[in-house]
Amino acid sequence: MKQVKFTACISFAMLLIGCASIDVQEASNPNTTKTVWPNGTKAAIALTYDDAVDSHLDVALPALDAAGLKGTFYVTLDRYPWNHRTKEWVAAADNGHELGNHTFNHPCKASLPGREWVDPKKDLDKYTIAQMIAEIESVNETLSKLDGKQVRSFGYPCSESVTSDGSYYNAIKPLFVAARGVYDVPYVEGDIYNIPAYGPEGATGEQLIAYVKSVVAKGGAGSLLFHGVGADHLKVSAEAHQELLDYLVAHQDEIWVDTVVNIGLYVSGQ
């Protein structure tokens, strides 16, 4: 068996709360202990962008395109930039970026400290698993009509999965090939429905690069979770984001940068 190592760093309530290492078993080449990533690279990195904010289209996407890199945009369909700039998001998908499912309402748990901002109608504590899955399936249908894709990944809003009647973590598995980090589900070896994410609000380029280096050192896979880039909420500066992209381009011989859906497909052997 060969192994994929994931470096786990999840951001919750704007604080980095934990790091771990996860081994993902793959049924090939039993004499090696590390994944043979595409084109001889040493690690895989996914660049992910949450909530369909304007700075994704205005700053992040042009920077990615200029660098020749592909990202996963976890779009929330009730957001103004999504509804008023839909054609631009679809154009991004046509250019090889992923439109990942980040639900319609972005439900989060209002019961947690500092969550006064959660709309009562979008309170995950009041959702049922069935309601959550119905919303997620509806978003999948909408996205498929727009980008023509039948396979994509999921990003848990607020990195949470527990509703009024339990976690919807298992219920999403038939709907996606992979999902990015959820803090309320324990890490399990080989779990591509809880791929670790590093949420770098306010991080410098040096800090972003340091995270990437840590993933490369382990020969595994990791993801970066961005909200605003140069503007909007929970932002990192455009300069820090660009510094990261420049580093990734300069090290393409050792780092495979791709969408979450493509990394998920690779790890699962599909």
Image: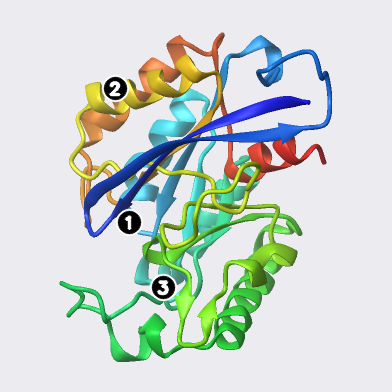
- Between 238 and 114, the one nearer to me in the picture: 114
- Between 62 and 14, the one nearer to me in the picture: 14
Q: Residue 262, labelled with which disc?
A: none
Q: Residue type at mark 3?
A: His
Element class at badge 2: helix
Q: Residue type at mark 1?
A: Asp
Measure the alpha-carbon separation of dots 2 and 3. Answer: 30 Å
Measure the alpha-carbon separation of dots 1 and 3. Answer: 17 Å
Q: Residues within 10 Å of mark 2 (few under 14, many from 20)?
A: some
Answer whether labels 2 and 3 touch (C-beta < 8 Å). Answer: no
The residue lying at 81 percent from left, 19 percent from top is 30
The residue lying at 53 percent from left, 88 percent from top is 128
The residue lying at 63 percent from left, 29 percent from top is 4
Q: Position of residue 235 (x, y in %)?
A: 22, 48
Q: Is residue 122 above or below residue 79?
A: below
Q: Position of residue 87 (x, y in %)?
A: 53, 60
The residue lying at 59 percent from left, 74 percent from top is 136
**Side (left or right) of 208 relative to 159:** left
Quadrant occupied by the C terminus: top right
Q: Residue 106, labelled with which disc?
A: 3
Q: Position of residue 129 (x, y in %)?
A: 57, 83
Measure the alpha-carbon separation of dots 1 and 2. Answer: 20 Å
Q: Residue type at mark 2?
A: Glu
Quadrant occupied by the N terminus: top right
**Side (left or right) of 42 relative to 199:** right
- Between 80 and 251, the one nearer to me in the picture: 251
Location of mark 2 (residue): 243
Q: Residue 54, labelled with which disc?
A: 1
